[in-house]
Image: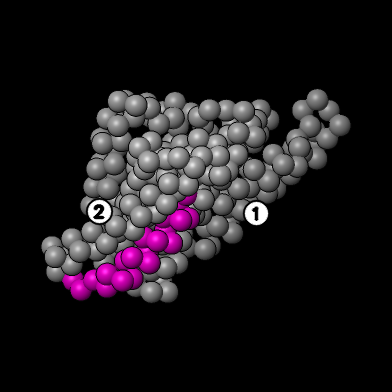
Amino acid sequence: MVTRIIVGLALGPAFLAALYFLPPIALAVVVAFIAGTASFELLRATKAADHRGMYIFTAAAAALIPLGYGLGCSGWTVREVTIPLAVALCLPALGWYGTEREVRFEHIIMCLFGGVGLPLFLSALVQLKELDNGQFYVLLPVICSFTTDIGAYFFGVFLGKHRGITQVSPNKSLEGFIGGILTGCLCMLLYGWLVGRFGGIAVKLPVMAWYGLLGSAVTEIGDLFFSLIKRQCGVKDYGSLLPGHGGMLDRFDSTIFAAPTLLLLVEILPAF
């Protein structure tokens, strides 16, 4: 637990600083590294990486999509990556059918999710950075997901009584889920106040509350979704890259869902 807290205290501020100060293209490089690493970890956990070459195509595709957004290619990159990736996955599946190296359909779907869906969701960070006042907007998903995780953990540890509400994570409690959402919502309000106070721009705090409420709820769903994959695959962590946290995907699993959700909310209802 001590290692987890120390790494979290070091990683969190460093990543927030990178989001705030880096220009979009440099941020795209960072997100590409995260996406490619997380994609590889996902394929390794689901055994899709056992098929030679599939994880290479998938991890490369995952890295290219955020870079495309950083270079201003937007949706073109997704289409240009998805079609070659689908072909690269289907050809060996067709060639190896009926042999001991046969590729199962669910592995192809997992590769498509890891190579397209996962980086597409993370690319929302790059898109947020490119908006007006993007240096403030880009912090929303990370603040929301990190504070929700922290709130859920401590509320669950100290106040959790009603456990087992989901068999995906039976040790998680109702109090932890509620506490995570409340913490995320309060921290989002605090962040909005700080932006208004020191950023010199008008902030709609009720809108920030909605960001926190909906973003935190989706954050918890994202965390449970990737926990479900780990349970079904019989692994504890996706990797060991980050001591105390596991792999890249273990740390950014909730951000993967929070980033596109908050991008959508910002586009529909901007807070500043």
Left or right: 59, with 54 as reference point: left
Above or below, comparing residue 207 to residue 77 in the picture: below
Colour scheme in the image?
Answer: one colour
What numbered label is drawn on residue 20? Answer: 2
> Residue pushed farthest front?
161
Question: What kind of element bears circle 1?
Answer: helix
Q: Nearer the viewer, residue 41 or 151?
A: 151
For badge 2, the amino acid type reads Tyr
- Residue hosting label 1: 83
Left or right: 260, with 56 as reference point: left
Label 2 vs 1, first from the N-terminus: 2
| Residue 56 seen anywhere in this rendered image of the structure | no
Q: CA distance from mark 2 to mark 1?
A: 33 Å
For badge 1, the amino acid type reads Ile
What numbered label is drawn on residue 182? Answer: none
| Residue 182 seen anywhere in this rendered image of the structure | yes
Q: Position of residue 41 (x, y in %)?
A: 53, 34
Instruction: Answer whether labels 2 and 1 touch (C-beta < 8 Å).
Output: no
Q: Position of residue 210 (x, y in %)?
A: 38, 67
Above or below, comparing residue 172 to residue 73 in the picture: above
Q: Position of residue 176 (x, y in %)?
A: 42, 45
Verify whether residue 207 appears in magenta.
yes
Discs 2/1, front? 2
Q: Nearer the viewer, residue 104 or 219?
A: 219
Span of residues in magenta:
201-220
Corner quadrant of residue 182: bottom left
Q: Position of residue 253 (x, y in %)?
A: 47, 44
Name the residue: 35% across, 45% down: 151
Q: Nearer the viewer, residue 262 or 112?
A: 262
